[in-house]
Amino acid sequence: MFSWYGIDSVKKSGMLRRAGARRVPPDELIRTIEALGILIADPPLNRKRESLKKAILVDQEKSPHPHTIRHYLQELIEIVTDINSKV
């Protein structure tokens, strides 16, 4: 299973809008981080399944030519290496 979380909103066409400046109240931020932590950790005593405020489900289209996990990891290594060389 693959989960993806973002802060961009989705247009009616299904395309993402760019995330603009947002003011998130501290209590909403804390609830969101807690909900994500619970979803990731999946503690057996907390099976309530927290919900994310105003979250919408977006189905990801399947790629006709998916890459291997190794390919994606190599891409990440290259990106991190490039970032580190600029720091």
Image (cartoon, rainbow, N blue to C red):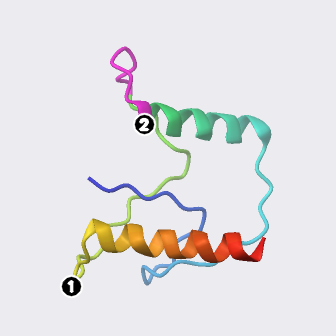
Compared to residue 5, the image places residue 30 above or below, namely above
Disc 1 is placed on an element classified as loop
Residue 43 on image: x %, y %: 38, 22
CB-based contact (under 8 Å), mark 1 and mark 2:
no
Residue farthest to the top, as pictured? 45
> Is residue 62 covered in magenta?
no
Magenta stretch in the rendered image: 40-48
> Is residue 47 covered in magenta?
yes
Could you tell me which quadrant the C terminus lies in?
bottom right
Disc 2 is placed on an element classified as helix
Compared to residue 40, the image places residue 16 above or below, namely below
Residue under the point 26% across and 77% down: 67
Compared to residue 47, the image places residue 79 above or below, namely below
Residue 17 on image: x %, y %: 59, 78
Residue under the point 47% across and 82% down: 15
In this rendering, the count of numbered labels is: 2
User: Label 1: which residue?
Assistant: 65
**Mark found first going from the N terminus, 1 or 2:** 2
Question: Is residue 61 among what the camera can see?
Answer: yes
- Name the residue type under label 1: His
Q: Quadrant of residue 42?
A: top left
User: Label 2: which residue?
Assistant: 39
Residue under the point 33% across and 74% down: 71
Q: In the figure, is residue 27 to the left or right of 8?
A: right
Q: Quadrant of residue 49?
A: top left
